[in-house]
Image (cartoon, rainbow, N blue to C red):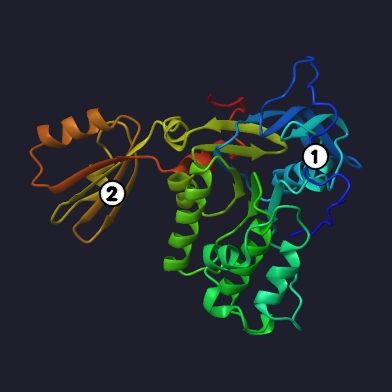
Amino acid sequence: MTLIQTDPATAGSPPTTAFTPGDGRPSSAAVEFDGVSRRFGDVLALDDVRLSIRPGETVALLGPNGAGKSTAIGLMLGLLEPTSGAVSVLGMSPRQAVASGRIGSMLQQTGLPTNVRVGELVDFARRLYPHPLSQAAVLERSGLTDLSDRSVDRLSGGESQRLRFAIGIAGDPDLVFLDEPTVAMDVETRRAFWADMRRSASEGRTILFATHYLEEADQVADRVVVLDHGRIVADGTGRAIRARIGSRTIRFDLADADATTLATLPAVTEVDVRGNAVRLVSDDADRTVREIFRMDLPIHDLEVTGADLEDAFIALTSPSITRQEGIR
C-alpha cells in the first residue's frame, strides 16, 4: 500500500488534457495499456501489452510468479514508467490519477506501523484525500469497527489484511487495486470482503485484483486476464477461459473397478481409482460415457464436469502451450 499526499491546489480538479492512446482517440477506459513494454535491464517484464478495462468492471489479474503482474500494477499506480507504450488510468496519467485521490490500493507486501491504534491509522489515511469516506464507513466496510481501539501490533494476519483494505478505500476511490487481498482471512471474513467488493462495483467503482485463489477469481470477477512471460495469454470471462480446455472429468462409483480396463475406454487420458470412487479424464466425455453404458458397467452417481479455472490456468501457462492473444 502506498500513501500519497494530495496536493490541495489540484485535489479534485480534472486533468487539463485527456489521455490519448497512440491512435489519437480520447480514452474513456478506467485502465488502458496501449502497446506497453517494460524492461529491467535485459529482462522484458511486459511485452507489448494492450489492455482496456471498462469503468465498473471487476477484473482478476492472474499469472505465475514472474509473469508481470507486479510490474503491471506498478505501472498503473505510477510507481514505474513504461519503457515503451502508454498507460492511462481514469483518462489521465497514473500519477495524475493518484494525485487526484481517485485511486485506492491494497498491496500485499506492505508493513504497518505498530505504535498506533487501528482507528488512528485509518483516520490518518483519510486525511490524505480530498473527499474521504467517513471514519465510521471505512471501519464498517473493512470489518474493523470493534477493533478501532486495538493496537496495530496486536492484530492477527487476517485483521492486518482488513486494515490494509481500510487504508486502500479510505479516500472513497473510483478505482481500487487489490494485491492478494484475502490472504490470511478466514472463510467468513473472505465472504464478507467480496460481498463489499460486489457492492462497490455495483456503485460504479472499478476493481482490479491479483490473486492466487483461482476459485475466488472465477466466482468474483466479471473478467479474468492471464499474464505469462509478460504477455496476455487469455482475456475473458472465467467460463470462456475454462472452455478453452477440451478435457472433461467423469466421476462415478464402481465396485471392484479395474483401472487397466477403464484406461482402454475411448478418449480417456487419465484414470484414478480409490476404492469404489473412480475419476476419469477424457478428451471426449460423450464418447467415453456412451462406451461405459454400452459395456453395462454397474456404475452409480455418474457426474461429468468441465475443467475448472485452475486446469485452464495450468494449461495456458504451460511451456508446451502455444501463446495466443485472448478471448474477448
Along the viewing direction, whichever of 280 and 82 lies nearer the viewer:
82
**Residue 281 placed where, x, y %?**
33, 41
**Residue 293 placed where, x, y %?**
11, 35
Kind of residue at disc 1: Ser
Describe the element under mark 1 as helix, strand or loop: loop
Quarter of the image with the N terminus in it: bottom right
Kind of residue at disc 2: Arg
> Which quadrant of the view contains residue 22?
top right
Note whether residue 142 is visible: yes
The mark total stands at 2
- Mark 1 or 2: in front is 1
The residue beneath circle 2 is 279
**Residue 13 placed where, x, y %?**
80, 39
Can you say whether 77 is above or below 290 in the image?
Answer: below
Q: Residue at x 67, y 84 (%)?
A: 151
Answer left or right for 278 relative to 37.
left
Mark pair 1, 2: CA separation: 60 Å
Discs 1, 2 touching: Cβ within 8 Å: no
The residue beneath circle 1 is 13
Which residue is outermost to the right?
A: 41
* Circle 2 Cα neighbour tier, 10 Å, few/some/many (<14 / 14–19 / ≥20): some
Can you say whether 133 is above or below 93 in the image?
Answer: below
Answer left or right for 224 relative to 175.
left
Describe the element under mark 2 as helix, strand or loop: strand
